[in-house]
Image (tube, rainbow, N blue to C red):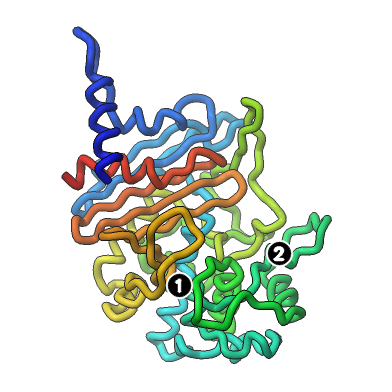
């Protein structure tokens, strides 16, 4: 934190140097890579429930020159996992499932090797299930669905470790959790999320996207840079799975999500405590953290990043300080986590 604060202070000092020059806004300095006729970003800083910064940069669609706005909907990628986890917790509150249920109870086609993996272990990435990305046959061009993931898992007895004995980040686990939501609720995952989370919170422009389903309004398309040129890279073979990363949302709607995490308007105190508690130490990742249910925990922060082809996002919350920074971008670089920490510094001091 000291290094980030120092960098931020030096940036402000240098930006304001020079007689007669207008001081440069340090937030705009931090967000400079997103500025101009390039894939952009939405930035939201919430302090004590109010938006103290709500800015947009760059373009949501290079081909049509559509500018990013606070209503622009970005593919959240793994930021979606906190919503899948919330859906499971809601179903547990209603008695439709138990967190210690074996996933095999809900998805009986899974092999015997996975029979003792519980929903709780899928939530905190301690299930040991093989990454579905590693099971996709070489040369596959069609997008992989959740049911494809289930079929591939059902055909392999491979696991990484005994359930509950280690941590390994698992998109597979959250795809399966999304399928469990459907089995336990009797509704499709997009409809359950809409009816039980998005609509009650007034997140009216947020949706779990499926090809052939409702279109994404104010949609940002993803891009990647190579040799100084931006190329649209909005979808890949793994972009159709849902529970691990398929939600589209805007900073305007995510402000409503953040507000709901402070009280019991959606989740009970007990469920939020479960989601925000450190259940396991994160390993194999470049950050010191523990993992809750859909959230990483580092010091006083609750956070999660999201990366898919052409998108890089992060939400970082300091609940004790009632501060949140959300940065959504439709590009493969830069990584936004440290930028969010940098922007938060003046509000923490």
| Residue drawn at (48%, 65%) of the image | 81
Residues packed near mark 2 inside 10 Å, few (<14), some (14 to 19) or many (20 plus): few
Residue 53 is at least partly visible in this image: no
- Would you identify the image quadrant in which residue 129 lies? bottom right
As measured in the structure, the alpha-carbon distance from the residue carrying label 2 to the one carrying label 1 is 24 Å
In the rendered structure, find residue 134 and report the number of the disc placed on it.
Answer: 2
Return the x and y of residue 104 as percentages of the image width and height: 61, 88
Q: Is residue 274 left or right of residue 236?
A: left
- Count neighbours of disc 1 (C-alpha within 10 A) and say few if under 14, some if 14 to 19, many if 20 or more: many
Circle 1: element type = helix
Residue shown at 74% from the left, 79% from the top = 156
Q: Is residue 73 left or right of residue 128?
A: left
Is residue 289 in view from this perspective?
A: yes
Q: Residue furthest top?
A: 19
Depth-wise, is mark 2 or mark 1 nearer the camera? Answer: 2
Element on which disc 2 rests: helix
x and y percentages locating residue 161 in the rendered image? 59, 78
Please name the residue that numbered disc 1 is placed on: 85
Task: Give 3 or 218, whichever is nearer the viewer.
Answer: 3
| Image location of residue 303, percent across then percent down | 37, 58
Give the answer, above or below, for where 274 lies relative to 8.
Answer: below
Residue at figure coordinates x 19%, y 60% from the top left: 320
- Precedes in sequence: disc 2 or disc 1: 1
The answer to whether 1 is drawn above or below residue 105 in the figure is above
Horizontal side of residue 221 vs 52, given as left or right: right
Does 193 appear above or below 7?
below
> In the rendered view, would you say 334 is above or below 35?
below
Residue lying farthest to the left in this orientation: 349
Residue name at image x 56 percent, y 65 percent: 244
Image coords of residue 254 (percent x, y):
38, 55
For residue 189, which quarter of the picture?
bottom right
């Amino acid at each position: 934190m000291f290094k980030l604060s120092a960098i931020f202070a030096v940036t402000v000092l240098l930006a304001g140097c020079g007689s007669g020059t207008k001081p440069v806004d340090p937030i705009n300095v931090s967000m400079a890579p997103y500025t101009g006729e390039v894939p952009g970003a939405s930035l939201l800083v919430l302090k004590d429930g109010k938006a103290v910064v709500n800015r947009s940069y760059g373009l949501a669609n290079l081909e049509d020159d559509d500018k990013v706005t606070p209503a622009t909907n970005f593919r959240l990628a793994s930021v979606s996992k906190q919503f899948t986890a919330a859906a499971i917790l809601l179903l547990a509150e209603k008695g439709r499932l138990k967190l210690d249920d074996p996933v095999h109870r809900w998805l009986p086609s899974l092999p015997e090797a996975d029979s003792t993996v519980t929903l709780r272990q899928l939530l905190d990435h301690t299930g040991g299930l093989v990454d579905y990305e590693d099971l996709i046959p070489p040369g596959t061009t069609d997008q992989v669905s959740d049911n494809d993931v289930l079929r591939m898992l059902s055909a392999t007895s491979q696991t990484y470790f005994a359930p509950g004995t280690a941590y390994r980040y698992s998109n597979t686990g959250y795809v399966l959790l999304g399928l469990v939501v459907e089995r336990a609720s009797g509704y499709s995952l997009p409809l359950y999320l809409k009816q039980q989370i998005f609509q009650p919170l007034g997140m009216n422009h947020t949706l779990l996207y499926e090809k052939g389903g409702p279109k994404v309004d104010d949609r940002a398309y993803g891009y990647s840079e190579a040799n100084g040129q931006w190329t649209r890279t909005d979808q890949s073979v793994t972009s159709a799975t849902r529970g691990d990363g398929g939600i589209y949302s805007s900073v305007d709607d995510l402000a409503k999500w953040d507000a709901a995490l402070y009280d019991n308007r959606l989740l009970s105190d007990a469920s939020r405590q479960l989601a925000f508690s450190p259940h396991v130490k994160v390993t194999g990742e470049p950050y010191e953290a523990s993992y809750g249910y859909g959230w990483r925990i580092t010091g006083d922060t609750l956070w999660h990043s999201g990366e898919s082809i052409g998108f890089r996002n992060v939400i970082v919350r300091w609940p004790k300080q009632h501060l949140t920074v959300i940065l959504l971008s439709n590009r493969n670089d830069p990584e936004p986590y440290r930028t969010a920490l940098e922007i938060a510094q003046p509000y923490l001091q």
